[in-house]
Image (spheres, rainbow, N blue to C red):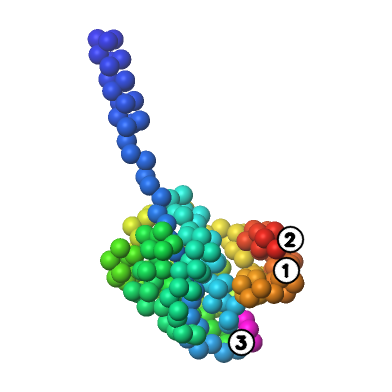
Amino acid sequence: MIRAVLWGVLGSSLLVSAAPAQSSVTIAVLPFEDRGSYGQDKEVFRALEVGIPAMLGAELGKHPRVRIAERGRVEAALKAENLAPNARVDAATAARVGTEAGARYAVTGNFADFYGKFRVDARVVDVGSGQIIKVVSNSAPELQDRAQMSRIMQDLAAKILTAASLSASGGSPDVRSQVPADAATQYSLGLLYEKEGERAKAVEHYQRALTAYPGYAEAREGMQRLR
């Protein structure tokens, strides 16, 4: 009887150890297009084209199975596409960029900020098939205020994870972890100027983001890259 129990325990242990670990899923987050925004300086909207994917990538990257494709690889793949200025990234282009970046899914889309009413639409592309599998947005009327930018990114990330057959990694978003909109704007401006090679301006805006929100890890990482 004891021997049978021991063999049962041993067999169960072997089955557990032999169970395949869940593999990671790489997602490439591409720039978002401004489809016609008003109410702030055009510079801010240019910054959000790179800031939104960075913020969205940070939210997606909190999932234990998600890896975000390296920004350098995504930018290099986009550059190789020779897209015209302000050209829309279609599903086929997103799939090619995702392939070059080693991703399983690519996310791109557009946004519009109309005097504080903020709307983001994100297209989730299956890189293998080149098909859009889902379009997600902050469609709820109570979630369309620019001041809720951080909460909007969390909402979109949860919907993208569902589209990619990945369960949400947590419960309700922690209000304490939400970045104020002014800090997110300054962070986006830092990314824009870093991309354009204006290091001093980038550092200035990253510092402003940290002043507005001292716990802003991504802004601190930006500062560290440039120092």
Contact? badges 1 and 2 (CB < 8 Å): yes
The amino acid at mark 3 is: Lys
Q: Which circle, 1 or 3, is nearer the viewer?
A: 1
Residue in front for this viewpoint, 59 or 138: 59
- Residue 149 visible in image: no
Residue 194 highlighted magenta (yes or no): no
Residue at 64%, 87% (x, y): give it: 41
Q: Quadrant of the N terminus?
A: top left
Check the image and report above or below for 180 versus 36: above
Label 1 crowd (10 A; few <14 / some 14-19 / many >=20): many
Of badges 1 and 2, the one in the foreground is: 2
- Label 1 and label 2: CA atoms lie apart by 9 Å
Main SS of the magenta segment? helix
Picture quadrant where residue 204 is located: bottom right
Q: At label 1, which amino acid type do we have?
A: Val
Q: Is residue 21 left or right of residue 37?
A: left
Q: Residues within 10 Å of mark 3 (few under 14, many from 20)?
A: few
Q: Classify mark 1: helix, strand or loop.
A: helix
Segment tinted magenta in the rendering: 40-44
Of the pair 5 and 54, the residue shown nearer to us:
54
- Residue carrying label 2: 227
Residue picked out by circle 3: 42
Mark seen at residue 203: 1
Tell me where residue 221 appears, x and y as whole percent.
65, 59
Q: Quadrant of the C terminus?
A: bottom right
